[in-house]
Image (cartoon, rainbow, N blue to C red):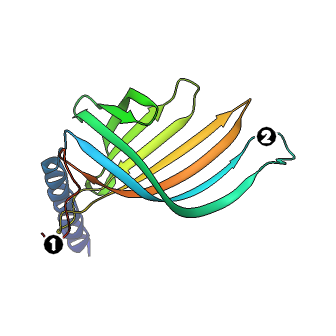
Amino acid sequence: MEKHLIAAFAATAMGSSAMSAEAAEWNPTYLGCVFTVSAFSATDDIYPDHRNEEQLKVGPTKFELAFAAIDLSAQRAQLIGNQGSAQVTAQRGGFESVVFLEWTPLGSVNLTTVLPPTKDGTIRAIASRHIAQPLSGYMASQFLGTCKDHIGELPIAGQ
């Protein structure tokens, strides 16, 4: 029994090493992302009555972000978005993903997770915004989209 457990542990450890080696292969230095589906909730009054609250809305949207000068070893990248540009934290996430974390000057958090290319070359991404400001209320949003790892049009799957 003990030999079987050791063999299972060794196989798991070897699988983890193989996954780590694979993760090191995808090291994008640029990602241009277009988000086309969103879920959104907000209020302009964060006090208990929430009189102007918008409940969760799901729908189409178009939201673009680009991450340039991605340096995973230094854990940083340059975010270029609709509000200008900023340096953000960039780290390797689970399943070979790349995770970008932005703390805005007002203390809100934006998080983007970009998954590695699929077999057909699709690079999927999830962006979340968590904004809370005393004078304007809160906004929570989640966006789904795709990215490209080069400048130019998004690649068409299957071509």
Which residue is located at x 29 percent, y 52 percent? 97
Mark 1 residue type: Gly
Residue 64: percent from the left, percent from the top? 39, 46
Residue 31: percent from the left, percent from the top? 26, 44
Going by the picture, which residue comes out furthest to the top? 105
Q: Quadrant of the C terminus?
A: bottom left
Q: Quadrant of residue 106?
A: top right
Q: Which type of secondary structure does the marked residue at label 2 adopt?
A: loop
Up/down of 133 relative to 151, above or below? above
Compared across the picture, whether 42 is left or right of 22 comes to right
Compared across the picture, whether 159 is left or right of 33 comes to left
Compared across the picture, whether 91 is left or right of 106 comes to left
Up/down of 8 relative to 71, above or below? below
Which residue is located at x 85 percent, y 44 percent? 48
Q: Which type of secondary structure does the marked residue at label 1 adopt?
A: loop
Residue tagged 1? 158
Residue tagged 2? 45
Q: Nearer the viewer, residue 13 or 81?
A: 81
Q: Quadrant of residue 74?
A: top left
Q: Residues within 10 Å of mark 1 (few under 14, many from 20)?
A: few
Residue 25: percent from the left, percent from the top? 12, 50
Q: Nearer the viewer, residue 20 or 50?
A: 50
Residue 102: percent from the left, percent from the top? 44, 34
Q: Nearer the viewer, residue 15 or 6?
A: 15
Q: Nearer the viewer, residue 113 or 37?
A: 37
